[in-house]
Amino acid sequence: MENIRNFCIIAHIDHGKSTLADRLLEVTKTVSARDLQAQTLDDMDLERERGITIKSHAIQMDYTHTDGKPYILNLIDTPGHVDFSYEVSRSLAACEGALLLVDAAQGIQAQTISNLYLAIENGLEIIPVINKIDMDGAMIEEVTDQIVDLIGCKAEDIILASGKTGIGIENILDAVIKRIPAPKGDKNAPLQALVFDSVFNQFRGVIAYVRILNGTLKKGDRVKFVATEKTYEVDEVGILKMNLTPKSEISAGDVGYIITGIKVSKEIKVGDTLTHLHNPCKQAIKGFEDVKPMVFAGIYPIDNDDFEELRDSLEKLQLNDASLVWEPETSLALGFGFRCGFLGLLHLEIVQERLEREYDMTIITTVPNVTYYAYQKDGTKLTVNNPSDLPEPTILNYVEEPFIKAQIITKPEYIGSIMKLCMDKRAILKNQVYLTPTKIEIQFEMPLAEIVFDFYDQLKSISKGYASFDYHMHDFRESDLVRLDIKLNGENVDAFSALIHRSKAYSFGSRLCEKLKELIPRQQFLIAIQAAIGAKIIARETISAMRKDVTAKCYGGDISRKRKLLEKQKKGKKRMRQVGNVEVPQEAFMAVLKLND
């Protein structure tokens, strides 16, 4: 155990974590030069296409230090986007140290700070690294001062590196070995292992990734998961190289995998404790919480016959993504589907994309919304995840909505436009601090519902990409919220319903009606699109009927003959409207998400 080091890389999005991991794999010869590619550890096409890490990736490296001793280094590469902070918290629980990466051209960003606090809470040894020092815009001295101010280290403790060219990689490996403590634990104690990730393999079932804190795990052992209380026999254990490498046993301090032939995804929980059945550990590993989704949306199959297939796909995806939660629901407009909870809008987008690519499911997603608390006049408190669950105004007393504490770090020249954007989103300014003469931190409290749609994109565009954004839940506050319904020919389409602040209901309703008018195809009968709050109509658009020119055959002659034909056509249209069904195309459901484009 003296020669094992477990560490992860944490940073803001796009500060070069995956590139640095590539260089570490190259220098330690874990991956041959032939197999090396950009973002080697990212195994989803989606990750490479977008240039982001979605899943944490663990890998073991063998490295012989300059003192001649061989070391085993277990590295976990983590995501940087705020939506995937749950992945980061799990990775930190399996490590003793972290490389805190800061981009030399951009300096400290919001997510750098929040990831750092997560690491400090877990008691990790922090090694600060300034990356991309070979770039033209690198501000090495400025960024060094920022890091010293932030974590109180000495300037000489900061390592200068470049993940692209390989500068400073040897120094990083040296610091990992010298500064990060070896794992503590007793190989002979009862087995106590943390499940920090899991993946589904269609041939072998669920593969759980574990960090062993105490004890030894061998092939053939009878093991038990503490939270689910399920017991299994171990088919295979091993370590995580580029591919899974079987071993006869893994013991305290090791990071590895275990295959027990579990076929049902619900039987394993990420964050659970694994122990021996006949000699269990005294207590489960602390510090793991159930994930709290921030954003809810309905996911429905385009064809209702695919409902069960969608359920299977979501179960398999949940294994690979522990922060996705879902439950069945029905909608009048869309039939049977699932109400899913996500960590944010990017997470929703990724899940949707993965369902389409990996499981070949074509789905419709409804308008995302957040959790509200509704208080009725008789004092009952209801949790509202779906706008249609909101009680009628006659029995509703008031509604509370979630507020977040947001932290934006930007250049001073963008303060005005960022302030305006935040104030439009009902934000309350709490504080602003100059971190350096060219960098300012602004703290707001604002409703979570306001950032769900497109806040992040708007922030990036008005700050030319320089503003970074991070947030965490704060509290629930009373707000003047109303349910906005969309009616097609007087029928509510529940998939378009949204809970919205009264001051914004009119503009949102009229924009949505205009958008639907463009997207819903014309029918043989007239279609009225209305936005309503309760019984009050606040906006309307009309799609006129497609009409045949029934008077074309009348040349001149008496007007009453033409009138008779038009009257006959009018009656037909009226009857058709009563029995006619308005088909809403899939693009219309998607368009709601992009109303401000």
Image (spheres, rainbow, N blue to C red):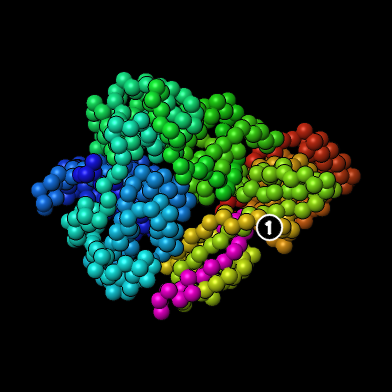
Q: Is residue 35 or residue 281 the one in the foreground?
A: 281
Q: Which residue is mark 1?
A: 477
Q: Is residue 147 or residue 407 the one in the foreground?
A: 147
Residue 91, percent from left and from top:
38, 46
Residue 592, percent from left and from top:
61, 50
* Picture residue at 53% right of the left edge, 29% below the top: 311
Residue 569, percent from left and from top:
81, 39
| Main SS category, magenta section | strand
* Picture residue at 55% right of the left edge, 45% below the top: 292
Amino acid type assigned to the residue bearing label 1 in the image: Arg
Residue 393, percent from left and from top:
81, 49
Q: Is residue 360 or residue 329 the one in the foreground?
A: 329
Position of 200 relative to 433 (above/below): above
* Picture residue at 41% right of the left edge, 28% below the top: 280
Considering the numbered disc 1 on the image, is that residue within a helix, a strand or a loop?
Answer: strand
Q: Which residues are magenta?
A: 433-451
* Picture residue at 33% right of the left edge, 36% below the top: 214
In the figure, is residue 55 to the left or right of 7?
Answer: right
The answer to whether residue 316 is visible is no
Q: Is residue 460 or residue 66 the one in the foreground?
A: 66
